[in-house]
Amino acid sequence: MREMKDSGAAFLGRVPKAWSVEKIKHHLERYEIRNPGDKDILSVYREYGVIPKDSRDDNHNVTSEDTSKYKYVKPGYFVINKMKAWQGSMGISEYEGVVSPAYFIYRFKDDLYFKKFFHYLLRGCYKDEFRRLSSGIREGQWDLPALSFENTLVLLPTNEEQDRIVCFLDHQCAEIDALSADIQSEIDTLEAYKRSIITETVTKGLDKNVKMKDSGIPWIGKVPNNWGIEKVKYHLMRKEPRNPGNQQVLSVYREYGVIPKDSRDDNHNVTSEDTSKYKYVKPGNLVINKMKAWQGSMGISDYEGIVSPAYFIYYFTDNTLIPKYIHYLFRSCYKDEFRRISGGIREGQWDLSPEAFADTLILLPPVNVQKGIVKYIEEKLIEMDQVIAQKQEQLSVLADYKKSLIYEYVTGKKEVV
């Protein structure tokens, strides 16, 4: 076993004695020139590093119409989102393009680092340290100062050892990523099947032998003959009382509907210090994020609490609709329609107007049919969510293993032989 020494940084621990421990500023320098024009927009993900923004459809950050102040990135540059460094939003870019003016761009001053080794090292070991070095009033607005980043200690093995580590990690991580991709594909298939079950059931019912009729709603098609079709405004009314005080903050997710904001750690929208203008929600109310209705950000709340002043709150005016039926109906069938009737200059700023929503046509099955539909869907979801949860746990185990593997080798605790 090779001889080890104290690195001088608690988060790195003991490292090989032959490795140098130096400051980032000795090898990298900030290099930020303005957009030269006609360049692709890049984005920095905590999961993937630096990639073209249009390579994924889950980035809804709005690109400025004027990108002249965006910063130019070349392949091999290190890009870091100073507000999200503590989440891992950084990496070596393999692409030419431009990024937000809020990002830091660094280039290497020498050839002592294999860029991919530096990529593994920073993304694999430094999130907690960057959290410690960042400052701000509250989480989500923490800022990593450039000076703190540049004075951070980094490990420097020989080029030969960096090369061995990178080759080893590339191979191991590729195998882990391939296995994870297979499991994620299985999850995606199950999620798609879940959606198909919900859509089929809320629009066709449970009786396969019932006579059908044209609903008059293009995106729904035929529905059972005894179902009504009416406008939202005949059954739901907008009512938005102010925060009565001492209420939990709720958030509206496109994946989950209305849930307590503190029940998840991936919501970094900032809650206002003054919540007096937040809107009060009771269990059974329909909550809609008017700017993201077309993404599915709506649902029936199971909770009492408050939501952003930008949301719409509706209550049911009669007993002809089961709230949970409407929850499944809207979330499964109406995203494209809400996209169509929303207005705005560009995607990400589209607004669903209350008037357009009020005139939207909805299905009105008999109450006993709605109850049967909700019961069937929720029984099916329990079964499928259990399987999905098992597969997500497998993904979590693989992610932890990958993280541990990278940490052990880039800090020299394990040696590539």
Image: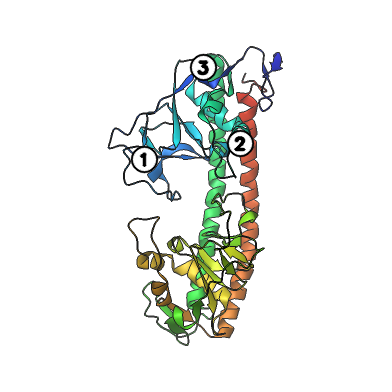
Q: Amino acid at mark 3?
A: His
* Residue assigned mark 3: 26
Query: Which residue lies under the disc numbered 2?
Result: 131
x 60%, y 24%: residue: 410
The amino acid type found where label 2 is placed reads: Arg
Picture coordinates of residue 145 (x, y %)?
53, 31
Q: Secondary structure at mark 1?
A: loop
Q: Quadrant of the C terminus?
A: top right
Residue 60 % position (x, y): 43, 51
- Of the 4 image quadrants, the one containing the N terminus is top right
Residue drawn at 52 percent across, 39 percent down = 83
Kindly state the secondary structure of the residue where label 2 is placed. Answer: helix
- In front: mark 3 or mark 1? 3
CA separation in Å, label 2 and label 3? 22 Å
Which badge, 2 or 1, comes first in the chain's sequence? 1
- The answer to whether residue 224 is seen in the rendering is no
